[in-house]
Structure formats: structure tokens, C-alpha cells
Amino acid sequence: MTYKVTLLPGDGIGPEVTEAARRVLEATGVAFEWEVAQVGAGVMAQYGTPLPEEALQSIRRNKIALKGPVTTPIGTGFRSVNVALRKELGLYACLRPCKTYPGVPSLYKDVDIVVVRENIEDLYAGIEFERGTAETTGIIKYINEAKKSKIGSDAGISIKVISETNSRRIVKYAFDYARKYQRTKVTAVHKANIMKFSDGLFLATARKVAKEYPDIPFEDRLVDNLAMQLVKNPQEYDVLVLPNLYGDIISDLCAGLVGGLGMAPGANIGEGVAVFEPTHGSAPKYAGQNKVNPMALMLSGVLMLRHLGEGTAADRLERAIAAVVAEGRNVTYDMKPPGKEAAAVGTKQVADAVIAKLA
Ligand code: NAD
């Protein structure tokens, strides 16, 4: 059968890494028909939005997309295309497996952590009030009166929203994932001692859900403590489930444990729709240089193959990537030991090497 997949090359290093991932996915022998759709700053002039309806409709139709990173201007300009995509398509779960492959330059061995991040609410819901506007002044006045607080008139405000419904859905997803892939435990991560009504609700909900999965061990950790423990002893952890902001930060930390952003894949999952993309961004300074590591997106392709039920092809592709890493010859600069970066190959050559291992 041929799988119709929406391909979003993105911008910056996106087009190079998506091309490399597309080539290795095709080399597995699984048949794909790619429907290419553009998003980001480059399409603003043509469509008046960085996320054209055409792209959204393509993903809704195909129910699956492989996506390169997209640049988000900082502090100004349009809102993140990535955040908008997650909201529009209801991609409530962000899955980020972080695994050490032998040969990866890392301080750690045998790390195998799966970060399950809530993807829609928390401080990322985009409910923000700009400093100095009439709306913000009114909200500050209300809070100061109701809570006897002293927020100054020069403050900006971002709202943290955590609901029982969305907490329940993400924690259930983490437990179902743990059961399906025979993982050993689930850890809920929070700061419920300080944020009692948001993180506290997340934790209370996680505890309730855990009771429905008596076969899977459950524990919880404060996020600051977890950050320290992950650096000290990452092998202690298996599936982590976190609200959006902590999930974002901790997944970058976990990427650092397994060789960096070049090795960190990801998937955004909704009801009947999924978008596969690396954890890393568009790294604009390296755009068009055939320099960066395409393995994070290739490994996102492995997740996509598993999602499609193509487990054998997924295992073959993962083994091929692991073999190239283990040999250490055809890898990009970030995978070379310090001082040996000059011997690195480019993005295209990594794809060639992976394809040779698949032959
Ligand atoms: P980044 O991940 O783009 O890059 C940070 C650094 O990590 C790079 O300078 C590079 O040294 C390294 N790096 C990243 N990807 C690499 C790869 N494949 N191979 C080797 N090294 C790699 O993060 P940033 O600089 O904070 O963000 C740049 C832009 O990307 C921003 O506009 C940000 O909003 C956007 N972004 C998009 C997504 C997404 O599309 N899902 C995710 C994160 C950031």
C-alpha cells in the first residue's frame, strides 16, 4: 500500500533535513506519496498567514505529516506556526523519545527516556496581556483587588491554564504508551508545592489515572529536583509525563543526555492525526550549508513508520541509523568528538550512508 503523507519542509535547515529523511524513508521500501505544503515566514506574502488553510487541510485529509522546523520571530511578528498547528489539529500529546545509541558523543550510556509532554495548554496556551494596554490595566486592577497583590502597572501577563480534562488525557496517553511498549514506570513531573491550583490539579489527576493502571509503577517528582536527578542518574527514569512548559525544557535536557538536538526525534499526536518532527528548531545560521544532522528527523520518521504499523521497516531504519552512528565515519559535526569536527560529513552524505546500510 502507498501512504499519502503531508510533507512540510519548513525553513532554515528544515528543507535539507526533510529531504534527507524523505530519502531514507523511501529506501525502506515502504511506498509514500508526499503532498508538499509550505508554512512559515516565506508564505506570509502569498497567503497573508504563516499557516495557510491549504497546509492544514492537507494534514487533516492525510491524517499524517512529516515536518521540518519553522522559525518563530522572537517577541514580535506572528505567533508560532508550531503552536498554532498543535492547537488547530488538537495535537495534544508530544512524544519525545531520548535514547543513547552506542557511538554518540555523550557523557551518558544506556539512557532510554520517553518524554510525554502536554501540548496545548499551560503557559503555551497563548493567553497573554501586553503591558500598558487598557485590558491589561483592568486585569491588574482586578487581581490586585481580589488577591490583595501588588502587581505594578508596568507588568505583562501570561496565563497558565491547566485543566483536569487535558491532564487526564495526557497522563492516560503516557500510561497507554507505557503499556503498549512494555516500559517500566511512569513519572509525573510538576511544581505542585508552589502552583497548587494548576500543577496541583495535574498531579491529583495523574494520581487518579495511575490507579487505573495498577500494572505500571507510578511516581511523581518536582521539576527542579527532576532536572538535577536527570543529570546525575538518567537511567533511573523511563516515561516522564509533564505539562507543556516543563515538557519543553526537560525534553531539550534529555536531548542533551543522548548526544544533542541532532539525535532527538518527536511526534505530535492528536485524535486520528499525527505530525512527526524533530525536537530541534530551524537553526538559521546553518541553513543551506549541508552541515546539520538529519538523524533527529530520520528518527521521527522511524516513529512515523511505527505509527503506520510498519514496525519491521521502522526497526530496519533505526538499525541502519544506529549502524552509521556506531561506525562514526559518516556523521555530522555534532556527532564527532571535540576537536575532530573537521572530519564530519554533510547532511546529504549522512542520508547516503543510512541508505547504504538499508540496501
Ligand atoms: P535550534 O534548535 O534551531 O538551534 C540551536 C542550536 O542547536 C543550533 O545553533 C545548532 O548548534 C544546534 N542544532 C539544532 N539542530 C541541529 C541539527 N539538526 N544538527 C546539528 N546541530 C543542531 O534552536 P533555536 O536557535 O533556539 O531556534 C531557532 C528557531 O527555530 C527559532 O525561530 C525557534 O522558534 C524555532 N524552533 C522551531 C521548532 C519547530 O519548528 N518545531 C522547534 C524549536 C525551535
Image (tube, helix red, strand yellow):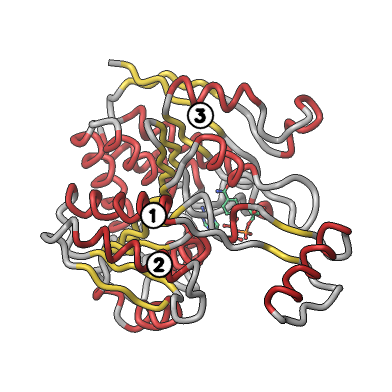
* Residue 131, numbered circle: none
- The part of the image, by quadrant, that contains residue 29 is top left
Q: Amino acid at mark 1?
A: Arg
Task: Look at label 2 and name its amino acid.
Answer: Cys
Residue at label 2?
A: 254
The local secondary structure at tag 2 comes to helix
The circle on residue 96 is 1
The quadrant of the picture occupied by the C terminus is: top left
Residue picked out by circle 3: 7
User: Tags 1 and 2 in contact by the CB under 8 Å rule?
Assistant: yes
Q: Is residue 260 left or right of residue 76?
A: left
Q: Nearer the viewer, residue 37 or 30?
A: 37
The residue under label 3 is which amino acid type? Leu
276 left or right, relative to 302 = right
Residue 112 shows in the view: no
Distance from the alpha carbon under mark 1 to that under mark 3: 20 Å
Report if the beta carbon of the residue with label 3 is closer than 8 angstroms to ligand 1. Answer: no
Q: Secondary structure at mark 1?
A: strand
- Between the residue at mark 2 and the residue at mark 3, the CA separation in whole angstroms equals 27 Å
Q: Compare residues 71 and 130 and report the one nearer the observer.
A: 130
**Residue 13 against residue 162 in the figure, above or below:** above
